[in-house]
Image (cartoon, rainbow, N blue to C red):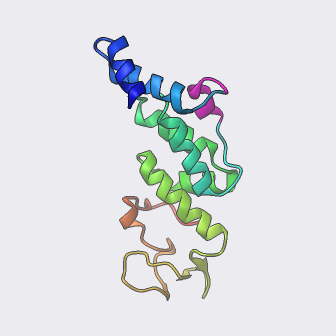
Amino acid sequence: IHWFNLLQEAEVGLSWTKLKRELIGRYGGRTSGNPFEELKDLSQTGSVDEYLAEFEYISSQVSRLPEEQYLGYFIGGLRLEIRRRVRTFNPMNRLQAMRLARDVEAEVLGEGFQRGGGIRGWKSNRDWGTGQGEKSGSGSGQGPHLGKLGVGLGPTQSIP
C-alpha cells in the first residue's frame, strides 16, 4: 500500500492505463516482450485449460481489441484437431470458442460423445442440456444439441 500511495503522489491524475502498467512493472507480468506479439504467437502446447489460462493472462495485459481479433487469436492458437472442430461451430465470441474448445478436447480425449449405433446414432456421457447423463439415440446425424453453449449447428454442418 505504501508503493501505491507513493505512486498516487508522483502521478497526478493517475489513469487506469498508467496504474495497470505500473502494477505489472512492479509485481511481475510479462518481461519477455510485447504482449500483443505474445498473444498473436501463442499456441496450445498442453491442455485447453492451460492454453486458456495463458491466453487470458496475456489478454489482460493488452489494451482493448475488437472481439473478432481476440476470437481469431484464440482459435488460431489451438491445436489443429481442436481448431478445425471449433471452427465448424462458427463461435461468435471468444467465450463460446473457449467452451467449445474444452468440449472438443473432452471429445478428442474420449470423454465426450462418440459415434455408435449406425451412421445416425450417437452416445454421450456428457449432459448436453437434457438432464440425462448417458443416452443414445438416432436423429438428424448432427450429434448432441449444443444450444446451452449458445451455438447451434447449421443445416449443412455435422459433428466430424
Vertical placement of residue 27 versus 156, above or below:
above
x and y, in percent, of residue 23 in the image: 46, 28
Let me know if residue 40 is in the magenta part: yes
Q: Residue at x 67, y 70 (%)?
A: 109
Let me know if residue 69 is in the magenta part: no
Give the camera-side residue of 12 and 53.
12
Give the camera-side residue of 122 and 46.
46
x and y, in percent, of residue 111 in the image: 60, 75
- Find the residue positioned furthest to the front: 2
- Find the residue positioned furthest to the right: 45
Give the camera-side residue of 124 and 90.
124
x and y, in percent, of residue 54 in the image: 58, 44
Q: Which quadrant holds the C terminus?
A: bottom right
Q: Is residue 33 left or right of residue 127?
A: right
Vertical placement of residue 104 versus 57, above or below:
below
Vertical placement of residue 41 versus 14, above or below:
below
Q: Which residues are magenta?
A: 32-41
Magenta segment's dominant SS is: helix
Vertical placement of residue 124 versus 24, above or below:
below
Q: Which quadrant holds the N terminus?
A: top left
x and y, in percent, of residue 139 in the image: 46, 80
When asked about the image quadrant of residue 114, the answer is bottom right
When asked about the image quadrant of residue 47, the answer is bottom right
Q: Residue at x 55, y 55 (%)?
A: 86
